[in-house]
Amino acid sequence: MNGKIIAIVVIAVLLGSMGASLAHGEVKADTWWNSAWKYKRAITISSQEVLNGYQLSLNISYNGHMRADFGDLRFTYYNTSAGAEESIPYWIESKVNGAWARVWVKVPHLNVGANTVYMYYGNPGAGSESNPDTTMSFYENFSSNPDNKFWIYRYNNDTANEGVWNSENGNFYLTTSEYRMGCMAFMKYHGSMAHGFYVHFRYMIGGGDGADGIAFAFYKDMRPYEIYKRVTSGGDLALSANSDGSMQISPGYAVELDTYLNNFDPYRDYVGITDTFSTPLPSAHYGTYETNKVDDGHWHSMDIYFSADTSHICVFLDNEKIIDLTGVPFAKYGCNYTGFGFGGATGDSDDNHIIDDVILTEYTDKKPTYILGKEVSQKASESAGGSTAGGGLGNYMWYIIIGVVAAAVTLVVLLLLRRRPPQAHITQNYSQENYENMQGDNYSNR
């Protein structure tokens, strides 16, 4: 009997521990971040690698429980270190009220495999907290003076014609249409581009007699610029630093939008990939595309996707893929520098070189995928044992009660079995033949 009592105690402890453990899991799954929001959906994110501060783009369809303008959207992440569900930054990049929204969410940490964040809505009185500056690695629409967003280096130190904010139109002139100008503007971004990057910007080149172009520089060594405080003008598109008229190599890569035919250029008007590891001039070209869209005086959009994990770059001009390149030169030189920015220059010919609406995020070809779960209401969550402010004591109590009841039922059953009258013993006489057959069976089943 003592052995049975010990067994009962062990069962009770195990059930109680199991209950507490399950209750802890329920707190994570069912805790309601804020009772003012009445609905939520889980977003399951699958990642092939560990990512920190990753910006994930979501396509959200309108739900009748949401505000029509999506102003009540909130996103949360369970912080295991703090043991609490916390709101995370998001930005609504574009939307059609009452129909859909494209939303960027900055997820603090993604492990390999499945990860979960939550989307809350259903609070008509909530104002939007959409914020591109806290969500993206870099964002600038030039609606205000961008001086604190860039490190700017000039050829002539002419702040009226090199690196100029146009406050009236809300854009940024790398150069105006004056001769012998140059500017490199490195972005003060946050986060890491170790896995790769995605950049979007708009540009316009024109208004002069056609030179020299714009370059988007990436994984660029900024130290020569920091040392010499000056860039070059003309055909190198400010991709090298300037020491008293001498070009100083700044290793790195660039996507050129070149508008002048120098002796090292393949065409007059083209988009191309270049590097400046062995020479200050952008004389090496990989994956070029000839087009008149680089110098036509109209606005165009450019999107560049680069995965450092696979040495793969794709360039889109006005939503059309124009370059798709893998390997050289990225596999050869690596991605060891941190400078990202825009260069622009004029020489003996000139143009306005203007940029606008710049977005930079981390990117990888092994990009995470996501699945939106079913809608859960706050009432349904509470009915299932959830809580609204990080509670969960009720869950613990329920599982402890279950453990105690189970132990009591086990005790009663054992007592009833103990009181049953003894049964007659049944003896089985084995013949030598049966015994040998049985042994044979045992051996054959080993």
Image (tube, rainbow, N blue to C red):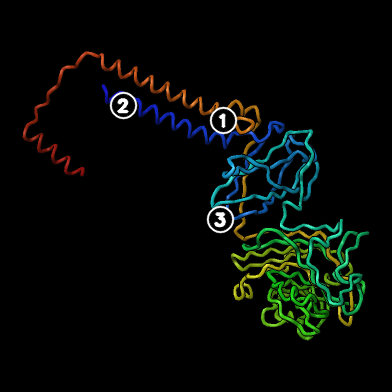
SS state under label 2: helix
Instruction: Mark 1: give few (<14), some (14-19) or many (20+) Cα within 10 Å.
Output: many
Q: Quadrant of the N terminus?
A: top left
Residue that carries the numbered disc 2 in the rendered image: 6
- Expressed as whole percent of the image width and height from the top left, the position of residue 294 reads 83, 71
Kind of residue sitting beneath label 3 = Gln
User: Which secondary structure lies at badge 1?
Assistant: loop
Q: Give the farthest residue toward the left.
A: 432
Q: Is residue 311 above or below residue 111?
A: below
Furthest residue to the front?
A: 227
Question: At 79% across and 71% down in the image, what residue appears?
Answer: 184
Quadrant position of residue 211: bottom right
Q: In this view, does 407 lie to the left or right of 291?
A: left
Q: How far apart are marks 1 and 2 (CA)?
A: 30 Å
**Pointer 3 and pointer 1: residues touching (CB < 8 Å)?**
no
Q: Which is closer to the viewer, label 3 or label 1?
A: 1
Identity of the residue drawn at 72% across and 76% down: 224
Q: Dot 3 corresponds to which residue?
A: 48
Residue 244 circle label? none
Q: How many marks?
A: 3
Residue density around tag 3, few if under 14, some if 14–19, many if 20 or more, within 10 Å: some
Left or right of 290 in this view: 45: left
Check disc 1 and give the amino acid type: Gly
Q: Position of residue 226 (x, y in %)?
A: 74, 73
Residue found at x 57% / y 37%: 28
Where is residue 225 drawn, in percent x and y? 75, 74
Percent of width and height locating residue 75? 68, 42
Mark 3 / mark 2, whichever is N-terminal: 2
- The earlier-in-sequence mark between 1 and 2 is 2
Where does label 1 land, which residue?
Answer: 392
